[in-house]
Amino acid sequence: MGKKSEAYVDTSALIAFADSSDTHHPLFRRLFSDPPALVTTVLVLGEGHAWFLRRYDRTRALQFLAMVDVMPLSVLPVGPEEHLAAAGLLRRFSDQSLTLTDAVGLGLMRARRIRMCWSTDRHLGLTGVPLAVTAY
C-alpha cells in the first residue's frame, strides 16, 4: 500500500520535465525539485523512450533513460496481475482512447491508494485522482 504522499508519475510528466520546450516544463521542474515518494512503471519508461526516439533521435532517447536512472523514482514491474487489472479498466472505460500504459497506471494508483498523479493526460484522472496540472 502506498504512502499518503506518494505520487504516480506518468509519461507526460517525465517528458515535460526533460523537454524544456514543453508547456508544462516549469511546473514539473518545480515539482521534481522537491518530490514526495514517486512511483511509475516500466511501461511509462518505454513510452517516454519511444517518444524521444520518434521526436528527436537515439541520443535523446538514451539521455531520457539516463535521466530516469538518477531520479528518486521507484520503477515498478508490470506482471500478469497488473495486466489483468488494466484490461478490466480498458473495458470499463472503453469509450475513452485509453492506452494500456494509462490503464496500468490507473490500476496501480487504485491498488496503492495513490492520491496524486503527475500527468498532463486527462485520462489519468478518470478515476478521480487529481492531476498535477490542475492541483498545483
Image: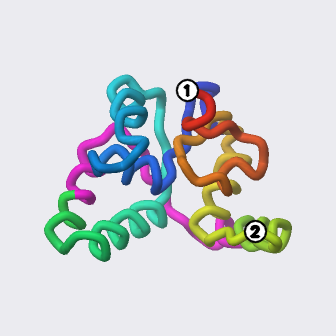
The image quadrant of residue 54 is: bottom left
Q: In this view, does 79 lie to the left or right of 129?
A: left
At x 47% / y 27%, what residue is drawn? 36
Q: Answer whether residue 71 is magenta in the image.
A: yes
The residue nearer to you, when weighing 89 against 121, is 121
Check whether the beta carbons of the residues at disc 2 and disc 1 lie within 8 A of each other.
no
Residue at which label 2 appears:
96
Q: In this view, does 4 lie to the left or right of 127?
A: left
The residue nearer to you, when weighing 20 against 38, is 20
The residue nearer to you, when weighing 72 against 128, is 128
Q: Where is residue 78 in the image (x, y as percent from the top left)?
A: 55, 66
Q: What residue type is labelled 1?
A: Tyr
Q: In this view, does 49 lie to the left or right of 2?
A: left
Residue at which label 1 appears:
136
The image quadrant of residue 96 is: bottom right
At x 62% / y 71%, what residue is drawn? 99
